[in-house]
Image: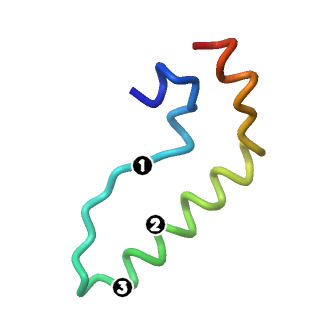
Amino acid sequence: MLQQLGVEKERYRIEWVSAAEGDKFAQLVNEITNEVKKIGPFNKEDAKKEA
């Protein structure tokens, strides 16, 4: 659904992480943050044109 709204699939990710998996959570946050930094800022005007 997010892709239909113009949000690139690299900007979101669904993962299941237990409350006991703090290291895994931190790793996932770092991975996603780095990926979004590579992509750059989200431009909602461009997203509207693509959708």
Residue 13 in picture, x, y percent from top left: 42, 48
Quarter of the picture containing the N terminus is top left
Q: Which of 13 and 42 is in front in this view?
A: 42
Amino acid of disc 1: Arg
Amino acid of disc 3: Gly
The residue that label 1 is drawn on is 13
Q: Which of marks 1 and 3 is nearer the N terminus?
A: 1
| Depicted 41 relative to depicted 50: above or below | below
**Residue beneath the point at 57% across and 13% down:** 51
Q: State left or right for residue 41 relative to residue 4.
A: right
Using the image, tell me which numbered label, if any, was put on residue 22. Answer: 3
Q: How many numbered discs, if any? A: 3
Whole-Å distance between the Cαs marked 2 and 3?
10 Å
Q: Which of 39 and 49 is in front in this view?
A: 49
Q: Which of marks 2 and 1 is nearer the N terminus?
A: 1
Amino acid of disc 2: Leu
Q: State left or right for residue 22 relative to residue 41.
A: left
**Residue beneath the point at 75% across and 33% down:** 43
Secondary structure of the residue carrying numbered label 1: loop
**Residue beneath the point at 48% across and 46% down:** 12
Q: In which quarter of the image is residue 40?
A: top right
Callout 2–callout 1 Cβ contact below 8 Å: yes
Secondary structure of the residue carrying numbered label 3: helix
Using the image, tell me which numbered label, if any, was put on residue 23. Answer: none
Whole-Å distance between the Cαs marked 2 and 1?
9 Å
Q: Nearer the viewer, residue 39 or 7?
A: 7
| Depicted 12 relative to depicted 51: above or below | below
**Residue beneath the point at 55% across and 40% down:** 10
The residue that label 2 is drawn on is 28
